[in-house]
Image (tube, grey):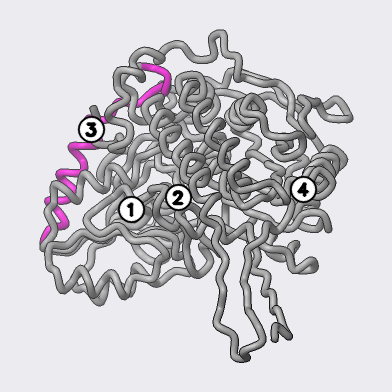
Amino acid sequence: MSMLLSRTILPLHRTVRSIQGQILRTMHLQQSQAFVNGRWVGARGGQTFDVTNPANERVIGTVPDMDVSDANEAIDAAYSAFYDKQWHNSTAKERAALLKKWFQLMEANRSEIAQIMTAESGKPIPESMGEITYGNSFVEWFAEEARRIYGEIVPAPQANRQIMLTKQPVGVAALITPWNFPHAMITRKAAAAIAAGCTVVIKPAEDTPLTALALTKLAEEAGFPKGVVNVVTSSRKNAASIGELLCTSDKVAAISFTGSTEVGKLLYRQCANGIKRIGLELGGNAPFIVFKSADLDKAVTGAMNSKFRNCGQTCISANRFLIQDEIHDEFIAKLTEKLKALKIGDGSQDGVQIGPLINHAQIKKVSHFVEDAQQKGAKIIYGGKPLTNHGSLFFEPTIVTHLRDDMLLYNEEVFGPVVSVIRFKTEEEALKIANGTQRGLAGYFYSNDLNQVFRVSRLLETGMIGVNEGLISTTEAAFGGIKESGIGREGSKYGIDEYVYIKYLCYGNLD
């Protein structure tokens, strides 16, 4: 099995083989309606849109194309559930029990969720199974964290006073999630919000709504009260207006968004008038630095893991490969051999490691970035073009060298299977290049020089760093970036903080 697969996927290989080739057969979790106030509903206007499989562009489902009136109904339902139906007064133990049930149902339905996810996102079945392991772990984690939302008793400066700090849920949380991890980005947000005592309105990406609805079906089966979990689906046509409503509605207390920096900035501005709580996990431009002291085989394995998961469509994917002079050519040679061995195709087929890009806009972007670099003097060592024999959304795993700072591949996130290589001489030069961007989500470097490890870890300007490791995401760690890559943290014990506020209680005249 390829080194592309994360360690969480490896034990699942028997299950993977049993479900490959069975996409979307007799599945009770595939839904054709949205979920508002405990009911499966269509759009008020009756509009729908198709969901297609990017591997072959066939329609695999149809869901409601909702607008702001539908979104308002979902907001009202969440608001009523929080206040009128007293969800905000539910106990941590009650919320934990519901989250545990949701987790158990997701575990019991892994195979069907994976089939749906692969069909609508294009990622190979083993990667879908790995994402389910990852996504489910957030529900399990926050089910446990719900009972550990502690306050404080603070020593008062006067003898007749007591100072108490408590944490309370903020209210309705609107969760806007991306297409590249349609399971884990929902569970990472929703489980934390629900554990804190919030109700949620989820707006999944238009490319991958079926996974969101499958998870919601299981939330319904878990027994969440009406209005606690709501899902609004829409096409691109209505996405912007719904997003604006979620940001400006007085009934929404918090926004959590994962997606591009450009859209994140827009949502940030829209939240400003209401001084709304906002969490943003935005785009990256991750450096992957290999120093001359590194173990090259481990560095190549880390590069494959970091770069080619989900066909390079991950926010923490390595984007700029900075390779030191002395080991540059050897690293490229080893990496090229790994790329040649990759199996490309429909993710539902056995052994496929690289699937399609998500849509036509994405393949157009990746092709444009590679053409721009080539026209400006870069060299394509391997790949470099669409793979039309597989389908219209497939692109070759690619290695491009001789990058310069006037090229798109040097400055922007490609979000595709392209390794952009920059040669450097000194550590100072590498850090200058790595930090020379307004994005600061993740970074990676490989070195066996202990002094260098501590030095570079301190100086690299990113919110997360993989040191001699290409797979860094885990439930227990705080996920998030700095600079223009976001605000706040998801996962870990800090993930709850996005959905609670601290209330200060001063008890006086206690003589």
> Reading the chain from its start, which is encountered first: label 3 or label 4?
4
Answer whether residue 460 is magenta in the image.
no
Percent coordinates x, y for residue 342 in the rendering: 27, 30
Task: Tell me the SS state at disc 2.
Answer: loop
Residue drawn at x 36%, y 27% as measured from the top left = 126
Task: Tell me the SS state at disc 3.
Answer: helix
Query: Identity of the amino acid at label 2?
Result: Val
Q: Which residues are magenta?
A: 326-349
Q: Residues within 10 Å of mark 2 (few under 14, many from 20)?
A: many
Query: Taking the image as drawn, is residue 367 in sight?
Result: no
Out of 354 and 17, give the one closest to the viewer: 17
Q: Residues within 10 Å of mark 1 (few under 14, many from 20)?
A: many
- Report the mark closest to the observer, 3 or 4: 4
Asked whether disc 1 touches disc 2, contact meaning CB atoms under 8 Å apart, the reply is yes
Q: Residue 9's quadrant in the figure?
A: top left
Q: Residues within 10 Å of mark 3 (few under 14, many from 20)?
A: few
Query: Taking the image as drawn, is residue 195 in sight?
Result: yes
What residue sits right under mark 2 in the picture? 414
Out of 303 and 341, give the one closest to the viewer: 303
Indicate left or right for 118 with 126 as reference. Answer: right
> Reading the chain from its start, which is encountered first: label 3 or label 2?
3
What residue sits right under mark 3 in the picture? 340
What residue sits right under mark 1 in the picture? 420
Query: Identity of the amino acid at label 1?
Result: Ser
392 relative to 236, above or below: above
What label sits on residue 82 in the rendered view? 4
Mark 2 to mark 4 CA distance (whole Å): 41 Å
> Reading the chain from its start, which is encountered first: label 1 or label 2?
2
Mark 1 to mark 2 CA distance (whole Å): 9 Å
Percent coordinates x, y for residue 240 in the rendering: 74, 48
